[in-house]
């Protein structure tokens, strides 16, 4: 196992990061370009935590600034997502093995910098998460600036990305930034909704429980880091 002197942790929403923040000690807050980062100790390990807000742009900005200013040896992303596989239900866990943008033409991704359609997670970090995420599924996650709330849109995405297990709004932007900076990363999502016509009600019902479940796994994973 590689050494992790500093581990970065990102999530989109405070409900996803608060449980981690509460476990952090010796906190020091930095505000950079209006973005808040909290550095401290988690299980005795140096960590930096940020809540990036929704959308690809926010996720990429926070990831890049985290890398530039705090030099993490790896980045973990925790949060909730919509299911893209009808066998995966609310409160199930998905660990990404690769991510792509569902709202960008794949030809543009392939032929424009950094010439990647899929961004692959770090195997070591992903395996550590899966050790703590009993019964989790591992597979592709797709990212776009949309909260999927209709069966029609779900079907369109499933036709384009038949292997996708989850859909969300930040993961691939984090992956993109980590890839170009050569920083290992891993992403876990707990399912809050089925990305269908009932997604908004389901999200409201499961958001907090799903966010806490994912965050607790990240805390356990950090404890296992060397």
Image (spheres, rainbow, N blue to C red):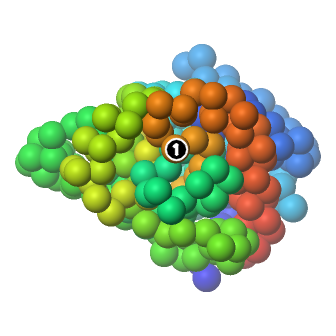
Side of 97 where 206 appears, left or right:
right
Q: Vertically, is 11 above or below 75?
A: above
Residue 168 image point, x, y percent: 47, 41
What residue lies at 32% left-to-right and 35% top-to-bottom? 153
Side of 112 where 5 appears, left or right:
right
What residue lies at 37% left-to-right and 48% top-to-bottom? 142
Residue on which the image places disc 1: 194
Q: In the depicted view, which residue is nearer to us: 48 or 51?
A: 51
Residue 178 visible somewhere in the drawing? no
Q: Vertically, is 106 above or below 59?
A: below
Residue 212 image point, x, y percent: 78, 47
Callout 1 environment at 10 Å: few (<14), some (14 to 19), or many (20+)? many
Quadrant, the N terminus: bottom right
Q: In the depicted view, which residue is nearer to us: 105 or 180?
A: 105
Q: In the depicted view, which residue is nearer to us: 215 or 197?
A: 197
Residue 34 image point, x, y percent: 60, 17
Q: Vertically, is 41 above or below 133?
A: above
């Amino acid at each position: 196992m590689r050494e992790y002197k500093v581990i970065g942790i990102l999530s989109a929403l405070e409900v996803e990061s608060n449980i981690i923040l509460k476990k952090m000690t010796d906190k020091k807050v930095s505000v950079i370009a209006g973005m808040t980062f909290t550095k401290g100790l988690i299980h005795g390990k140096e960590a930096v935590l940020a809540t990036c807000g929704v959308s690809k742009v926010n996720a990429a900005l926070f990831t890049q600034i985290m890398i530039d200013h705090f030099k993490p040896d790896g980045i973990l992303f925790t949060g909730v997502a919509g299911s893209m596989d009808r066998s995966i239900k609310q409160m199930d866990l998905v660990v990404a093995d690769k991510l792509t943008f569902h709202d960008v033409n794949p030809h543009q991704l392939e032929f424009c910098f950094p010439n990647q359609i899929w961004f692959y997670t770090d195997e070591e970090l992903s395996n550590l998460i899966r050790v703590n995420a009993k019964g989790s599924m591992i597979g592709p996650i797709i990212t776009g600036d949309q909260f999927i709330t209709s069966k029609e849109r779900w079907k369109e995405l499933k036709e384009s990305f038949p292997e996708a297990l989850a859909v969300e709004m930040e993961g691939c932007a984090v992956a993109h930034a980590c890839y170009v900076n050569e920083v290992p990363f891993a992403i876990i999502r707990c399912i809050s909704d089925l990305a269908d016509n009932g997604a908004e009600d389901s999200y409201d019902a499961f958001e907090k429980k799903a966010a806490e479940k994912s965050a607790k796994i990240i805390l356990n994973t950090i404890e296992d880091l060397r």
